[in-house]
Image (cartoon, rainbow, N blue to C red):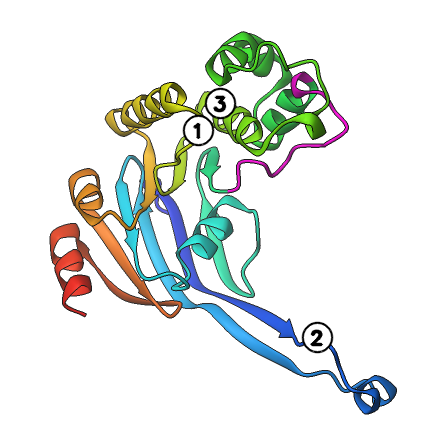
Amino acid sequence: MNNNIAIKLTNISKKYVLRHEKPTLVENIFRFRKKEEIWALKDINLGIKKGEKFGIVGDNGSGKTTLLKIISGITVPTEGRVEITGRVAALINLEAGFHPELTGEENIFLNGMLLGMSKKEIKNKFKKIIRFSGLENFIDTPFYTYSSGMALRLGFSIAVHSDPDILLIDEILAVGDQEFQQKSFQKMQDFFKKGKTIIFISHYLPTVVKLCPKTAWLEEGKLKSLDVSKKVISQYLKS
């Protein structure tokens, strides 16, 4: 892979098989089950350069989040090849990678290592992670006692402190109270100013145009258009 390329996707396709519930008695006896195959992505080819700010737009169900999950390694493609250079942090499912029986403190180490951080790196950033999350009073309690908002705040804090080379953002996340949302937004702005590779999904199209020079438009799992953001957004709106 070219040394200047951070992400290379070659013929990426993702298939999901849906099995319909409540089979009839005959279907149970003969093991006939109704199932439906859905291709969330089909033949996606993308090359994203190091340091590039790249937008992805499309309607709900077009495959945007599935694509980010494949890039981050949360799921694997049914077909095709993924090549990644650098550490990836995905602001998609922030509660993934946590263990309910472990404390917040223990989960920082677990989640951090899943993101590719070393124990030494986590120890050095440990206090910053807790301080940013605002969970100082709850960090030694089991994770299952956390509210959804608390879990998201801890996941966000770990992700942004992992110092990723590649950051995947599925919308600007509304995490926590107004103060925390402001801190989160400022952190995102810092990443955009740095030389990080960023893939940004949003339905707020003016933000995509402002932050991302190039954008891909997905439609029904296929790459409909790939060009400078203004041109792609214009095509998308006309559709």
Residue at the image position 28 percent from the left and 51 percent from the top: 203
Quadrant where the C terminus sits is: bottom left
Mark 1: secondary structure: loop
Q: From the viewer's perspective, is residue 30 above or below residue 217?
A: below
Indicate the amino acid at tag 1. Answer: Pro
Q: Position of residue 132 (x, y in %)?
A: 46, 15
Q: Position of residue 154 (x, y in %)?
A: 54, 24
Q: Find disc 2 in the rendering and name its residue.
A: 21
The quadrant holding residue 213 is: top left
User: Which one is earlier in the sequence, the residue at label 3 or at label 1?
Assistant: 3
Q: Is residue 45 magenta?
A: no
Residue at the image position 27 percent from the left and 45 percent from the top: 54
Q: Find disc 3 in the rendering and name its residue.
A: 157
Indicate the amino acid at tag 2. Answer: Glu
Mark 2: secondary structure: loop
Indicate the amino acid at tag 3. Answer: Ser
Q: Gap between marks 3 and 1, in whole Å?
A: 13 Å
Q: Find disc 1 in the rendering and name its residue.
A: 164
- Magenta stretch bounds: 93-105
Q: Gap between marks 3 and 2, in whole Å?
A: 39 Å
Horizontal arrangement in the rendering, residue 51 relative to residue 140 (left or right): left
User: Which one is earlier in the sequence, the residue at label 1 or at label 2?
Assistant: 2
Characterize the local packing of mark 3: few (<14), some (14-19) or many (20 or more) Cα atoms within 10 angstroms: many
Q: From the viewer's perspective, is residue 60 above or below residue 72?
A: below
Total count of labels: 3
